[in-house]
Amino acid sequence: MTELRDKLILLVDDESRLTTMMRMNLETDGLRVHVAASGREALDALREEMPDLILLDVMMPNMDGFETLRRIRLASHVPVIMLTAMNEENDRIRGLELGADDYVNKPFNYREVLSRIRAVLRRHYLPAPATMGLITVDDRLTIDFQKREVLINGERVNLRPTEYRLLYHLVQRAGYVVNHNDLLARVWGPEYHDETHYLRLYVTYLRQKIERDPANPVYILTERGVGYRFAALPTQG
């Protein structure tokens, strides 16, 4: 558990019995925990405590988890895992579209939550390996993996860590199809092999940021039922 030790978790939930149990378990596993009982307390703690990760309940009075997340994303890219008793696909997608990194359904097994915390922290804070250097895709798009920069017409594009890792693994095998399971394992971790909706959403995010026309992409191409392919790169001179 050394990769988790001393990381600060902001636990946001109005159920005191749950937060007491979760705090005890997380601290036993070497994490530090700050508890907030409402969305407003969470926003204050975000500024004052600077957590490494937020566990955020959806169903809270006054300001629910979705609105709290929206406000968090105005100020920070801190990773967020949603805790939700709602098992509707639309609610999960809504959270991911607002910027959640993951979600766990209530009631949950603590070990599942810990596994998700570990996976999210790993992909958020560990950079993708920079074995590739400067790549000029065309006269519009340039990617510098050494500097972790993506440029459109010379202007830097702000990518979140997960978006960057996804782009890296697609470009690394440009011209070839990368199947869904392979991308999920490389970008999110092996425990996410069935979570294809994550992949669809983040491909959409990337297309919105780098494609001229996201509805008709020329860089990130869909191979229906199989995976995705980054367009073949020109020979680098």
Image (cartoon, helix red, strand yellow):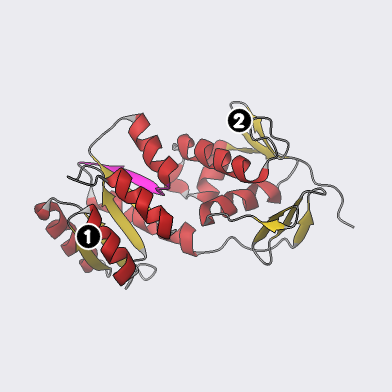
Question: Badge 1 is on which residue?
Answer: 41
- State the image coordinates of residue 116 (x, y, percent, origin top left): 36, 52
Badge 1, how many Cα within 10 Å: few under 14, some, many 20+?
A: few
Q: Secondary structure at mark 2?
A: loop
Question: Badge 2 is on which residue?
Answer: 226
Q: Amino acid at mark 2?
A: Val
Badge 2, how many Cα within 10 Å: few under 14, some, many 20+?
A: few
- State the image coordinates of residue 203 (x, y, percent, origin top left): 57, 40
Q: Residue at x 69, y 66 (%)?
A: 146
Cα–Cα gap, marks 2 and 1: 44 Å
Q: Which residues are magenta?
A: 99-106
Q: Are marks 2 and 1 in contact (CB under 8 Å)?
A: no
Q: Amino acid at mark 1?
A: Glu
Can the viewer see residue 54? Answer: yes
- State the image coordinates of residue 63 (x, y, percent, origin top left): 23, 47
- Based on the picture, tell me whether residue 120 belongs to the magenta stretch: no
- State the image coordinates of residue 181 (x, y, percent, origin top left): 53, 39
Q: Residue at x 25, y 44 (%)?
A: 64
Can the viewer see residue 119? Answer: no
Which of the image's four quarters has the N terminus? bottom left
Q: Earlier in the sequence, mark 2 or mark 1?
A: 1
Q: Residue furthest left?
A: 17
Compared across the picture, whether 146 is left or right of 104 comes to right
Quarter of the view holding residue 96: top left
